[in-house]
Amino acid sequence: MRPTFVLLAIVLAAPAAAQQPAADLTVDAITHGAFAGAPMPEPHWLADGSAYLDLRAAPGGGDDIIRVTAATGATTVVAPARVLAGSDGAPLHVEGIVPSADGSKILLFHNSVRVWRQNTRGVYDVLDVASGRVTPLSTQPGLQMFAKFSPDGRRAAFVRDNNLFVTDLATHEERALTTDGSDVIINGTSDWVYEEELAVRDAFRWSPDSKKIAFWRFDQSPIPIFPMLDELSLQARMIPERYPRPGDPNSKVTMGVVDADTRATTWLHTGNGEYLAALAWAGPDSVTVQRMPRVQNQIDLLMLSAATGDGRTVLTERDSAWVDVDEATPRWVANGTMFLWPSERSGWRQYYLYRRDGTLIARVTKDGVDVSSLAGVDDKHGYLYALAASPTPMQRQLFRYGLRGGNEMRVTTEPGTHTVSISPDGAAMVDSYSTAQLPPAASLVQLAVNGPRKVLEANAKLRERLAQITRAPEFFHVPMPNGTLLNALRIL
């Protein structure tokens, strides 16, 4: 039987004497002060898996862009902070980077503003790594969203004012691929409902051959306008927002494939479904769409032609209560002839291997634990890497499974919660782990050869500081009338 567990937090006031050292634990100190700790790596892997790029604090201020070699952990600075300046010569506070597939160019994201929950609208510049030259992605007015390189690195696409644009990086020519964007029509990003319900924000995808872009289009006209009160500004103001309450209609959503050269658009025949929850390329000529009803108790996986929009339903996932969309799937393996798919049909969340036509080959993972997410695939050696709630539901550990069967192997060993970033070839990973008592630490691990760990960030200063002032949380069980034991956490 699948175990039931709930994590409860009970915060009790401790005696004044015990609290005295913790007086420095203010919210500011925890978020960006003495107790914030060192930043963990955020790997941006190159397409061949040989290395990743990341931001690292520079001694003189700002951030360097570094390259870390996967095989050795050797670090080189590919762009020092002093050269990361805008067209006006002012230093950039780089908030994020997006490398091209080969790492020769890097998109620099800065001056962002908040859109709903996250800062997804801002300014993108293009860094040419070899020359160190920084140029704006767009010279037109307005902020950009979700800029990304085409796979061949020759162009970059982005969203501005609810339209989709593409820039030729050699000529700097900018072209609009859609023109009907407005307060009502949205192309390439999402409406409020899709962000809230499905976490869809970035709503366009380059084709593998760099010739086309698949995208969502939202028509919000059916949604009633709901007045919202903004009380965060000095003077409260009313915001008219298209916000569907229970029973109100949602946006009319369609999906299209636009040619990046001709701007001709093919609309996908997605059939009836309230939500088009996920979109991905399945090769240069076809896409997959995950379609759901509004009650979200079924997923239809559609395989559609990018040329005609026609296609078929490959598989259907149903549940009496709820099915969860996994945007990372289907994950294609074996040169696109098979794919991995998650399901809770057995009562446990597991991964299954299918042929391209939707024929089930085998279940890859095993009942007894929930497999929370697919972390990576080593296609060469036939391995799937996934995080699982094991050896107890209180932990997240990385396991390796054979795509064609075989014994599972636990890869991570430190107790607690692991967050991993695995290289595209499945040969290496960056592993960040923490516990309720210890802040995160990160290491580089050679998966293919089961090599030693290279510590990237030990967070030693914060660990030492916390050891001096905090008392370890206490885990215990709360018995229910039916005998179920709920996991609980108490902090004194």
Image: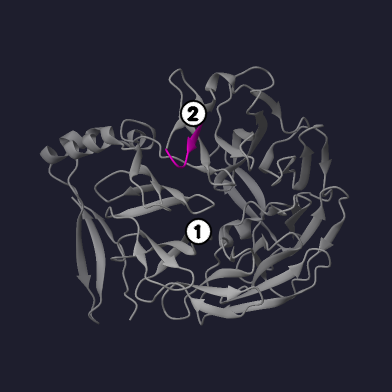
Badge 1: few (under 14), some or many (20 or more) residues near its Cα, within 10 Å? Answer: many
Q: Quadrant of residue 17?
A: top left
Q: What amino acid does circle 1 point to?
A: Asp
Which secondary structure class fits the magenta region best? strand
Considering only vertical position in the picture, is 79 above or below 101? above
What's the distance in space between the residues labelled 2 and 1, CA to CA?
26 Å
Residue drawn 68% across the image and 18% down it: 88
Closest to the observer: 218 or 291?
291
Position of 391 with respect to 477 (left or right) is right
Q: Position of residue 176 (x, y in %)?
A: 83, 44
Query: Can the viewer see residue 295?
Result: no
Q: Residue sitting at 39 percent across and 33 percent down?
A: 32
Q: Quadrant of the N terminus?
A: bottom left
Q: Is residue 164 magenta?
A: no
Q: Give coordinates of residue 13: x percent, y percent.
A: 19, 48
- Looking at the picture, tell me which residue is in the foreground, 132 or 316: 132
Tag 2: amino acid = Thr
Q: Earlier in the sequence, mark 2 or mark 1?
A: 2
Which of 269 and 331 lies nearest the eye of the viewer?
331
- Residue hosting label 2: 76
Closer to the camera in the image, 130 or 206: 130
The disc label shown at residue 117, or none: none
Give the magenta-colored segment's residue range: 65-72
Q: Which residue is mark 1?
A: 378
Compared with 423, 140 (above or below) is above
Q: Mark 1: which secondary structure?
A: strand
Kindly indicate the quadrant of the structure image that contains residue 161.
top right
Tell me which residue sits at (66%, 61%) in the image.
280
> In the visual, does 291 lie left or right of 252?
left
Pointers 2 and 1 in contact (C-beta within 8 Å):
no
Q: Is residue 166 visible?
A: yes
